[in-house]
Amino acid sequence: MRAVTTNSTWTAGTWARDMGRARVLGLLLALCSLAALFATATPAGAVDTTTQSSYLADRLRENPVYVSDQLPREVPLSTAPDFARLAKKTGVPTYLLVLPMLSSSDGRQLLGAVHDRLGRDGLYVLIEGTDVAQATAWGVRVPAEAAATVALYELPYDAGPLRSFECFVEVIAQGGPKAAARAEAARERFRDGGEPAEMYIGPSDRNNQSFLTGSLLTGVPLLIVLTAGYVRRRRRRSGARRRVPRWVVPGAAVLTAAAIALTAPVVFDQTTSSAARPPTPADLSARVERVAAGLKQDPVYADPESPRVLDTRQRERLHERISDFRRSDGGGPVFVLLVPQTPESEAAGDAELFAAAVHAKVGRDGVYVVADPDDGTIDVVNHGLRLDSGRLSFGLPDSLTFGDSKADEADDHLLGERLDALMTHLDKAPRTDRPQSVYTPPAAPSAAHENDLPPLFATDFWPGLFVGAFAALLLSGVVAGLTWGVGSLLRWRSPAPEPTDRLSRTAPTEPSASYLRRTAHAELTALTREFGSRDEHGPAWDHLDAAMLLLDGDLDRARQSGTDPATLVAVIVLARAGRAALSGGTTDRCCGVNPLHGPAVGRHHVRVSAEGAARRLLPVCEACRTTAIAHPSGIPDRLLKLPAPSPGDGSLPYYDATDGPLTAVPHGIARLVDKVRETAGVH
């Protein structure tokens, strides 16, 4: 009896202890489950790279070189064997990923995740777009970082991905010390401004080459003919005999034209504007076929090469909304394509064109929604449903198609919420009487020849022919003018310049008051001395009389500091005109730009202000006429500016600074004499 009782007591205690352990174990399992749930959950607004890295790891398990099908215009799938051939030269297991450049992915983190899932050591290289973006070595000793640095700094940006990877492999093969030294040298050159020159030219550069070729092809031979003809005429006039046959000049011109035409294609030998190879039809259709195959299995297709932007809950919610819309009145299938749209894709980044290609491959009508996981844009295209296609394509709110500031800040661009809002918009969209489709979008640029440069003898080559001929005529005229000018100088007997030329070169533009006083007194004194005791009433007398009237008959007043600068200039002009008249010359007008320049040689419309285009017809000296013809904007700097009446007022042109007799200078010396006499009250 005791034994039984004892056994019963032990059994109950053991059961209680086991139950307690079970509860503890259950609690631990629950905590572990919660921890796992929180560890795998994706925070709101973040992207999940687990699917992306798993997919890429599976592709590398099949082939150590993976080239995305989303870059056929830049990196066609058909270039994968070339990348594989280069990868074998590293000497270590190499795993290469060639992917589009996505702003939402981190290259180093992606390579680490792919390595963890693949579970193989080696050199992992990521090419994003056209450059080696990241390289990391696990379990092997290679200068991965130095090789990536060299590929970045030694090559121009347009070298292309294949050439960039080739340079990367070349540095890897050199070993650690040489690779490090080469990387440091590349950094130094780049830091000192030694950026490598571009490897390819663009269409505008080719147009410039064509223009230059055309200009040289007509300009140089024609210049030879014109120059030789001018020289021959000069020699004939001098009586010299012809020393060369007539056929030499035309023959030289023809040979020159032929040499230019044959040399230009050798010098300008570029035929393409990019390193990209022309894609094959299979390259251009690979991504469309992949997406279409995925849509036949699931109406929501998320690009496995891109980070996942929809979590499980959002994806299930989107499936429910799509099913409800398909069963609604006037509704139908909805296909969501979470695929990036890049300029290097088969559709050249055109979402509508991509949707049309996928629709043709899927073969089912419906609403095709292209949501870009990289930039967050959403495009909606209706193919065959009773919905207003125009409103769907162009009438959606910007918050749906482009997102708002919150969407811009979120890594996933809040595509889950915006796609849910889009389904609400489709549910409320008005139905039409008959099925509609969007207009057929224009075809994407031809990928086969989009990088081909135009022929050299095309485009701007033809305008270059005319410009070259015109330039030859102009240059031959310049040569003839220079030859005539040099001959005139050699025939010039007197090497000394004329007084008027000397005046135009030495006369100041902004003379000081003391200069005007000294010059006026000296000129008037010389006129008085040269006039002497002559008893004549000619022009010289009129000039002397007018000058003395300005000084109230007192010659010494010209040296007094209180004399008005405008008066002193008028005295100088009159005194010089009087001296010229005494020497037998005639001075009807002086330079209207600067009366101190001396006699005028003609009249010309000149600019009188640096601001605006105001012009005046003024008499000009030889130097001012040359300036007015060759450099019109230089005339305002040559205008005579009188000293300021008081400190701080600044200098002004003589015709703006006075209303006295000096204003008559542009109208001639005789008018100046009359003006002086009118002002003095003498008739």
Image: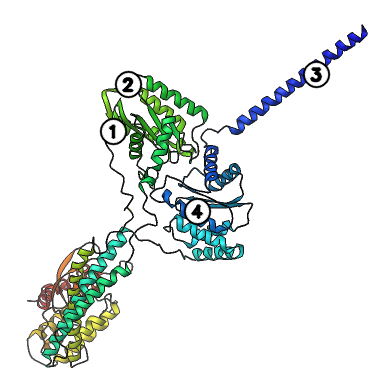
Q: Which mark is residue 623?
A: none
Q: Which mark is residue 438?
A: 1
- Mark 4–mark 3 Cα distance, whole angstroms, equals 64 Å
Q: Which mark is residue 84?
A: 4
Q: Is residue 7 above or below residue 100?
A: above
- Mark 1–mark 2 Cα distance, whole angstroms, equals 17 Å
Q: Is residue 509 above or below residue 581?
A: above
One can see residue 151 in this view? yes
Viewer-side label of 4, 3: 4
Name the one closer to the observer, 624 or 122.
Answer: 122
Residue type marked 3: Arg
SS of the residue at dot 2? loop
Q: Which mark is residue 330?
A: 2
- Mark 3–mark 2 Cα distance, whole angstroms, equals 65 Å
Viewer-side label of 2, 4: 4
Residue 319 spot, x, y in % from top left: 45, 26
Q: Residue furthest top?
A: 1
N-terminal label among 1 and 2: 2
Looking at the rendering, in which quadrant would you find the C terminus? bottom left
One can see residue 564 in this view? no
Q: Residue at x 41, y 41 (%)?
A: 287
